[in-house]
Amino acid sequence: MGALSMLAALCFMANKRDYYEVLGVGRDADKNQLKKAYRGLARQYHPDVNSEADAAERFKEVNEAYEVLSDDDKRARYDRFGHAGVQNDGGFGGFEGGFGSVADIFEEFFGGGGFGSSRRRRQGPRQGADLRYDLDITFEEAVFGVEKEIEIRRPATCPSCSGSGAEPGTKPITCTTCNGTGEERRVQQSILGSFVNVTTCRTCNGTGELIPNLCKTCDGRKQVQKTFTKKVRIPAGVDNDTQIRMSGEGAPGVNGGPPGNLYVVLHVQPHEFFQRRGNDIYLDLQINVAQAALGDEVAVPTIDGEERINVVAGTQSGTVHRLRGKGVPRLDRTGRGHIGRGDQHVIIQVAIPKNLSDRQQELFQELSRTLGKEVVPHKEKGILNQLKDALGDVFGL
């Protein structure tokens, strides 16, 4: 990688916008505030609904910011080191040469001053890779929580060679090309003077060692694929795309480093008739015209079981009944405890019959003569305004 490319890489990081600025939140924003800001911006800049030239880039920028700030570990590193602290998670994309972070770039310029040598990074302990598992759960399981057993296939240290890559009874040898450093250094002359070009050793690929007798179990890869069974505790109140981190359940570390983490991503299946918005549940309930006109006591399904509500005489379509505390448990900031529950909103829909019997037609005709046929503007709030009032707290209308 040339000097101009490395300078371009540094400028790329310097010009990246602050993630908090991208989402329009303060540095003390909690996860709910982050999610609310992310959803609004994602809807605004999604290429399917926004035809502006930079919509796709803004959408990508918003997703990148939320991915970092919604993860506690990544957010802590970002708060401390800025963009350089999270570049290793996705690599220093867009530039050739395999730079993983700003430290790699400075090493190319200054020989690693202040950042530690690449040899120590390659041969020292390194944390294993994070893994992802997608898990489908039902609407009820998301509301009340559940414990699931999952099977995940992941790398594990080879049991035959204990991770050395060499056949039992043998061991790796030091690479003679780089003398175990994992690097090849070449002095080059330029108009700016002499500088050292450091590249990964072509013989050992940066490991600093060679394995004459490969382990027959892992073929020298030091790891094998194994299937593990794990139990996942899903707290009550989770939502679609919630991530549950299982520390230390990812891929094994390198050279004695700690294992990575396993992220279980939840996918909540839609319910037959319940709809969720935040911590509230919504249900459309049909009643007939007689019940709406005369009033009635009707049974309403809730996530906890059947409840009965009184439909007052003269109820109109769009009337909303609120059942307090019958919604989804609210997770606290830790994601483990709860602070109350949301409500269930029952939206009354008056069903107009389509196929009347002869007797029903006679009754409606008789009723029609008593009601008259005059049409007048409606003075009360229409159904749209009623819904707007009822859902104002949810949508901020």
Image (cartoon, rainbow, N blue to C red):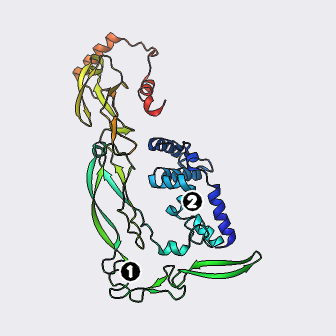
Looking at numbered disc 1 in the image, what kind of residue is underneath it?
Ser
Q: Earlier in the sequence, mark 1 or mark 2?
A: 2
371 versus 225 height, above or below: above
SS of the residue under disc 1: loop
Query: Residue 160 appears at what percent x and percent y?
Result: 31, 80
Point 48% across, 75% down: residue: 123
Viewer-proximal residue, 221 or 283?
221
Viewer-proximal residue, 72 or 385?
72
Look at mark 2 in the image and give the residue it sits on.
84
Query: Residue 94 appears at what percent x and percent y?
Result: 59, 65
Viewer-proximal residue, 52 or 194?
194
State which quarter of the image contains the N terminus: bottom right
Query: Residue 304 appears at what percent x and percent y?
Result: 24, 36
82 versus 192 height, above or below: above
171 versus 312 height, above or below: below
How many angstroms separate mark 1 from mark 2 (CA)? Answer: 32 Å
In this rendering, would 29 be left or right of 351?
right
In this rendering, would 390 be left or right of 196?
left
Point 55% across, 73% down: residue: 118
98 versus 284 height, above or below: below
Point 35% across, 62% down: residue: 249
Q: Quadrant of residue 239?
A: top left
Q: What label does residue 164 carry, if any?
A: 1
Q: Quadrant of residue 254?
A: bottom left
